[in-house]
Amino acid sequence: MAGLKQSMLSACLTTIALGAGSVGKSAMADDYLWLEEVEGEAALAWVEQQNTRSLPQIMSHPAYQQLYQNALEVHNSTARIPEISRRGEYLYNLWRDATHVRGLYRRTTLQEYSKSDPAWETVLDLDKLAADESQNWTWGGINCLAPDYNRCLMSLSIAGSDAAVVREFDISTKEFVQNGYELPEAKSRVNWLDENTIIVGTDLGPGSMTDSGYPAQLRVWQRGHTVQESELLYSAPVDSVSVYSYKLEDGENTYPVVHESLTFYTMDRFVYTGGELTALAIPQDAIITGLFRNQLFVELKSDWHEFKQGAVIYAPMPDVLAGAAQFKLFIQPDERSAILDIQFTRNAVIVNWLDNVRGRLERFTMAALGDGSSSDSWLKETVAFDPNGSVAVQNASYHYQDFFVSYNSFLEPTTLYHVDNSLQSTPLKSMPAMFDASQFETHQYMATSADGTQIPYFVVISRAAERDGSNPTQLWAYGGFELSYRPSYSAIIGRNWLEQGGVYVLANIRGGGEFGPRWHQAGLLKNRHKVYEDFEAVAEDLIARKITSPRHLGIRGGSNGGLLVGAAVTRRPDLFNAVISQVPLLDMQRYSKLLAGASWMGEYGDPDQEDMWAYIRSYSPYHNVHADVTYPKIFFTTSTRDDRVHPGHARKMVAKMLDQGHDVLYYENTEGGHAGAANNNQRAQLDALIYAYFLERLQNNK
């Protein structure tokens, strides 16, 4: 490997340095910069060499083929609940199986969907489209114009990347609109104003995209004109994260919103009416949750006026636009609860709570006065679901009084319920059990972090498991961006890990949103070490309870979670015997210069600032791996087509560790985007690689 690197280094360094933005002297000393050239000949040759070296090692495990078949059966199962998007009288679904690898976009009615074997109407066959156009299309999403939802802006990604082609599609004819709206591959943002007008942000050359790779400008694009000649509506500096547009609607009122993300956690919002932009006078770190009866609902991430962090407040939208709003308190979480989600129906506000990482669903309606009008007094009702699982509200809309709820837990497969206006829950679809859950049980424990904070974590374990430290254990966490992770059913984990004798652990460490914004902010910027201390505390608690031991403990994380496990293994290599780092951030000196990395400086800080870099340097995995330290045999995975987290992170870490003499494994899928896989066959392969590696490292290591 060292010979290959040296022979290609001089040819690649200049190209990378010129193409990757400003590079300081210490970054230029990086011998592995050439691996940042995503599709460079030298870099791809190195990738092929590593795949050829690593894959046979993992795939030689006796259980690999069975693990692959287990995963493929799950991914291709027709027993899956079709995920739906409700638009008008139809429910839409993207369906993938062994026959439709890329996907079949289809629709049905609620009445038909309620049947055991509903009839579906095909809208678009993505596999046929890819074959007809000789293009590696994957689904990128769709934005349809209310109220008939026939005219749509469809995004098609090449091999799973975030960047996509946008094409106008007519659902009524099931065809792309001739001479309709169309954009080439880019990280575009589009939103309908009316049938002949859209607000668009796309790559139009210098100044049109931010340093993070997202739109910096919005234009009002009238049908019949080119996007280049369209009126410039809004322009942000390139060091902002992005700008985009969306609509706030409640059935009677519509407000087009222009949103500029100044950083990942601060933003300016403007309402576009009468050709003018009016700023919304709300805190820059607050989140707009929606519009209900012409009242703007806002969730606070910091204290504001008399309202506390985490509160949801509301005020009449006309007053907000006039700068004269008198906000009122809607709800306020306590220390051990958080608002996971708020959605709005025609007549109610639905709040999905987390209480100590357990679900609770409530509906709020305005109390009626004697004259039939409504007061500001709220009536609260509980929507009954088992609190030991996870609930997710789906397809709530101002168009309807009803909504859907998905419920599952670690050991209970997903059931989709239809909840009517009287709060009666009717099961519509249920996933069959895809592994025998009766032999397992779930526990929630607390670990004490270095600063005394109690960190909750879940353990899924066989009822017969001995507490002798010998159980092969997979510890998973994320710990970033205020994302909350809850109990959820995974047939892959059930089949390929629990039924193989493994223990699964989900840690709710700081940096996430399990206890609201304070839990997230406790792990931001120069508090990042607390995230890693929490993770290590859970590992130590598992060992202290004799659920496992370092020889049988493996850790896994992806994206920010890939950074987490990278930091954990370089900080505490003694705690783990297996590490899977997927699509990870690892080089924290250059992360802000690679792809979307600049948008995450609100989470990690700016490494170009000397004081901040001194702190980031203390945990950056790429800068804390050493030749004279013994590490477990780490498995890194990434994707060439990941245009969110640069594959150079994983490539460079592996190259550096190999040159230091460490034994590591590497797999880079040439497709798949940030998900690491573009179709079910690739998903099954990645699943099988992960669990064959874990079994090899943890199961028989007595």
Image (cartoon, helix red, strand yellow):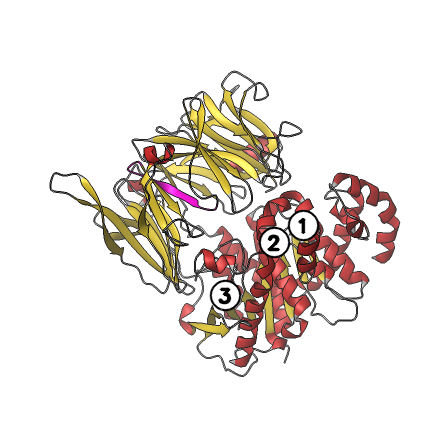
Residue identifier under label 2: 604
Q: Which residues are magenta?
A: 285-294
Task: Give the label, 3 or 1, closer to the camera.
Answer: 1
Cα–Cα span, label 2 and label 3: 23 Å
Whether residue 102 is situated above or below residue 222 in the rendered picture: below
Whether residue 164 is situated above or below residue 329 in the rendered picture: above
Asked whether disc 2 touches disc 1, contact meaning CB atoms under 8 Å apart, the reply is yes
Asked whether disc 2 touches disc 3, contact meaning CB atoms under 8 Å apart, the reply is no
Pointer 1 local density, CA inside 10 Å: few below 14, some 14–19, many at least 20: many
Residue, x 68% and y 66% (percent of image)?
570
Residue, x 56% and y 44% (percent of image)?
263
Residue 479, magenta (yes or no): no
Return the mark for residue 506. 3
Q: Earlier in the sequence, mark 3 or mark 1?
A: 3
- Residue farthest bottom in this picture: 468
Image quadrant in which the C terminus is located: bottom right
Q: Is residue 671 left or right of residue 249?
A: right
Return the mark for residue 591. 1
Q: Position of residue 243 (x, y in %)?
A: 53, 35
Pointer 3 local density, CA inside 10 Å: few below 14, some 14–19, many at least 20: many
